[in-house]
Amino acid sequence: MPAYAQDQERAAAEALKRGPSGLPLPRFVSLKSGRVNMRVGPGTQYAVAWLYLKPGLPVEIIQEYDNWRRVRDADGAEGWINQALLSGRRTAVVAPWFKGKERAALPLMTEPKEDSAVIAEVEPGVVGEVAACNGTWCRMNFAGHEGWISQEAIWGVYPGETVQE
């Protein structure tokens, strides 16, 4: 196959991974406001399916239509949110799959390794800011407590994803 055909094929494959905005799909973002309506369709004429009251909550954009984004939350609920209510700021929620169950808090470490000192213990369901991820560990800030947490223990960053500061 000629080099230009390979380049076109690669560009076409990359285009499939991007939405009309030119940004990757899927991707994680967070809620900008303390009152965000998630609707059943992409427009204000559609019914509100859910009202979010927590700013900074991470959501995953899975589709784009005009200025509306189809999102999925940590519980798996899907719906449409106007892009103006979303922020590119990266946040993550700790082990939402353990929320409401008897489960010990997860350690926030001083360094990105199992045997480092524990700074704090973070309860499942707590939301924090993602500062950086190396594909295995994420440096996060939880209300002023900054440290490293296993990337497998959070929702808001893809497995193996790296996030630059």
Image (spheres, rainbow, N blue to C red):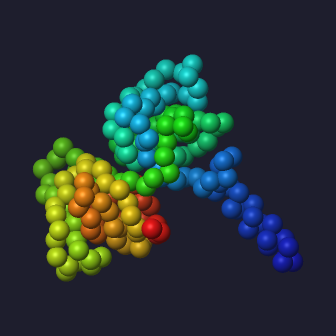
Against 137, residue 80 (above or below) is above
Q: Quadrant of the C terminus?
A: bottom left
Q: Position of residue 44 (x, y in %)?
A: 56, 22
Q: Is residue 155 visible?
A: no
Residue 149: % across, % down: 28, 67
Whether 129 is drawn above or below 8: the answer is above
In the image: residue 60, left or right of residue 53? right
Residue 74 in the image: state x and y as whole percent.
Answer: 37, 46
Q: Residue furthest front?
A: 144
Camera-side residue: 123 or 1?
123
Query: Residue at the location (27% across, 65% down)?
Result: 146
Return the x and y of residue 89 as percentages of the image width and height.
45, 53
Closer to us: 158 or 118: 118
Q: Nearer the viewer, residue 63 or 56?
A: 56
**In which quarter of the view is residue 113 placed?**
bottom left
Q: Residue at x 17, y 68 (%)?
A: 119
Looking at the image, which residue is at 18% across and 43% down?
100
Quadrant (top left/top right/bottom left/bottom right) for the N terminus:
bottom right
Q: Could one spot residue 70 in this view of the protein?
A: yes
Q: How many marks?
A: 0
Does 79 appear above or below 48? below
Look at 32% across and 63% down and name the residue there. Answer: 140
Q: Is residue 80 above or below residue 25?
A: above
Along the horizontal axis of the image, is 12 left or right of 83? Answer: right
Q: Is residue 59 left or right of residue 118?
A: right
Which of the 4 image quadrants contains residue 155? bottom left
